[in-house]
Image (spheres, rainbow, N blue to C red):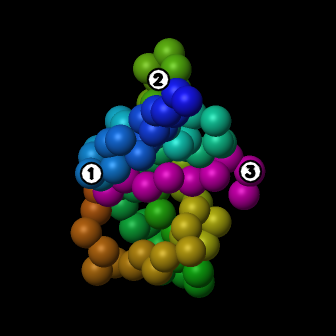
Amino acid sequence: MKKKKAPHIVQLRHKLDDYTIFSNEQFAKMGFLRIKVTDYISSDFPGFVRAEFRDIKGDIHVIEEKVPVLSDQEWGEDTVYPFWTLVPDKY
């Protein structure tokens, strides 16, 4: 009986904090967009942030969106910016 090899993601479990491995294994088949949240731009309810991402051609796109649309976490003026986050492509 031939033993099956463990999936790559299980073999490299200790490296899951590495974004490249994690994205290649998990998000390649799922629809997520990696964005860089750069500033908190408005404290009007529910709060607005500015974020940017690069497309496949390398062009940078800037979006301004409500915090609850991008995440279920609470971001505010006291949050340390910039930081990276993942947003589902169908929100």
Label drawn at residue 79? none
Element at badge 1? helix
Q: Quadrant of the C terminus?
A: bottom right
Badge 2: residue crowd in 10 Å (few <14, some 14–19, many ≥20):
few
- Labels 1 and 3: the sequence-earlier one: 1
Q: Say left or right for 32 vs 10.
A: right
Q: Which residue is drawn at 56% across and 74% down?
A: 72
Cα distance in 3D space between marks 3 and 2: 21 Å
Q: Does 91 sit above or below residue 60? A: below
Label 3 belongs to which residue? 90
Label 1 belongs to which residue? 14
Eye-nearest disc, 1 or 2:
1
Q: State whether residue 45 appears in this view.
A: yes
Badge 1: residue crowd in 10 Å (few <14, some 14–19, many ≥20):
few
13 or 20, nearer to the observer: 13
Check disc 1 and give the amino acid type: His
> Of helix, strand and loop, which mostly describes the magenta segment?
strand
Percent of width and height locating residue 17:
29, 52
Check disc 3 and give the amino acid type: Lys
21 or 53, nearer to the observer: 21
- Point out the residue furthest to the top here: 57
**Chain part drawn in magenta:** 83-91
Element at badge 3? loop
Eye-nearest disc, 1 or 3:
1
Q: Does 56 sit above or below residue 73? A: above
Cα distance in 3D space between marks 1 and 2: 33 Å
Q: Does 76 sit above or below residue 65? A: below
Label 2 belongs to which residue? 59
Element at badge 2? loop
